[in-house]
Amino acid sequence: MKLKHLFIILLSVLVVSCKKDEGTKLDPNTITINDGGMITGTYTNGQKVVVKKGTVILRGYTYFESGSQLTIEPGTIIKSDIASKGALVIERGAKIFAEGTATEPIVFTSGKAVGERMPGDWGGIIVLGNAPTNRLTEPTIEGGVGRKYGGTDPNDNSGVIKYVRIEFAGIAEAQGSEINGLTLGGVGAGTTIDYVQVTYGNDDAYEFFGGTVNAKHLIAYATADDDFDFDFGYVGKIQYGFSLRNPEFVDGGDAGNGIECDNDATGTLATPITRPNLSNFTILGPNDAANTAANHNFACRFRRATQFILNNSIMLGHPDAGLSLESDATYSAVIDGFSQFKNNLIFASSNIFRISSVAVAGASAANIQTKATTDGTVVLANVAAASLTSPFTLTAPNALPTAGAAALTGAAFTGVQNDAFFDKVTFKGAFGTTNWATGWTNFNFTKGANGY
């Protein structure tokens, strides 16, 4: 009898153990990449990749196809393989969850050693969604990745990118077909983009090709081409954008602007009309520093039949213009109120307000200045009049307004900006009394003989 009871007890333990093991089995479609591992190739429908905290390699053009998912743990460093020039492509129907923290950001960077890293060491991050564009057919994203974007779902969700740094990206397939630091093609409003810094990108820091995605807390530092670029019917909302240019670094083949915005490449009236809804930007140029490269251009370049909302912002230190409007439709949208440039602080080395390729009868830069100042924009006498702490210090910029600065008051959120997305702050520019860039960002790059 004792042996029988012992057998029953042992059998019960074995059954319980088996059930426990079954309950902790990993999803067979889950791929875990640990410290020292590699992300590469194509991940297909149903595959879930989890990148654990550590340092991993991104090798070559890496695709996440529809139905697949990439999750990256806070504190992870992803370095591109040098020979294969990595690029991360999140396709329509796939999702990325790269959610760092203020103390443990996720960093995408060059695989070269510190002191040898250079802009264009790898591709960048491309996210493609199913939100509308103004293209008649599904467009293919630039950069040589060969993938399409856009659709009919304005609330499409491509995941979360939060507390992420993207450094030394921007390889080019060909002139005019580059990979940006962060490329968003037809990305929908269900996606979260918040607290992102793009540093030393060899093309644009951010480019939005259509879509409806909203974003907050974006930093563009030492970009070669444009800091923020909008095309193909983008109609999302962005609050808190900060850009600072390195005077000695700019695209050699194209002019570098704080904002560049087109309806499309030829200035058609295709709908939806590109109309980014922007508030609380601080856009800083080279500020006439010694050895400033020639191709630094405008703080804001709106052209090719685009519309825009840009309010409660600060533009300082660009050499050729603060606000440039190019095309009849772009100019008329400002005069007629479809576009807004309200409650801003602005100064540029020359042509604070500028028009080009405008044939509207009576059109002039003076008309634009009158419209802007009537709408609360203040033309500053010089850069110092903005009273920012130390905004042009490259390795440690501080764009917080000093005590009593005009930037601390006067912001307003009415009309299209009287919406739950926008924080109803009183200050102009990206920063008020709190530096939200503290902790997770990095500006401290010094160039040596072989790189940064």
Image (spheres, grey):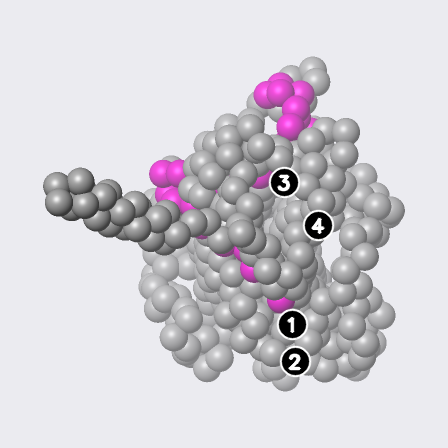
Image spot of residue 448 (x, y percent)? 65, 17
Quadrant that contains the N terminus: top left
For the question of whether residue 209 can be seen, the reply is: yes
Say the numbered circle drawn on residue 42.
4
The amino acid type found where label 3 is placed reads Ile
Find the distance from the CA under tag 3 to the CA under tag 4. Answer: 9 Å
Find the distance from the CA under tag 3 to the CA under tag 2. Answer: 31 Å
Residue 107 colored magenta? Answer: yes
Q: Are marks 1 and 3 in contact (CB under 8 Å)?
A: no
Q: Are marks 4 and 2 in contact (CB under 8 Å)?
A: no
- Pair 1/3: label in front: 3
Residue at label 2? 152
Q: Are marks 3 and 4 in contact (CB under 8 Å)?
A: no
Mark 1 lies on a secondary structure that is: loop
Residue drawn at 59 percent across, 60 percent down? 46
Q: Earlier in the sequence, mark 2 or mark 1?
A: 1
Lateral position of residue 251 relative to residue 129, left or right: right
- Kindly give the residue lying farthest to the front in the view shown: 1
Mark 2 lies on a secondary structure that is: loop
Residue at label 1? 130
**Predominant SS along the magenta part:** loop
Q: Are marks 3 and 2 in contact (CB under 8 Å)?
A: no
Find the distance from the CA under tag 4 to the CA under tag 2. Answer: 25 Å
Image spot of residue 12 (x, y percent)? 24, 49
- Kindly give the residue lying farthest to the left in the view shown: 2
- Pair 4/2: label in front: 4
Which portion, as a residue range, is magenta?
93-119
The amino acid type found where label 4 is placed reads Thr
Q: Are marks 2 and 1 in contact (CB under 8 Å)?
A: yes
Lateral position of residue 343 relative to residue 175, left or right: left
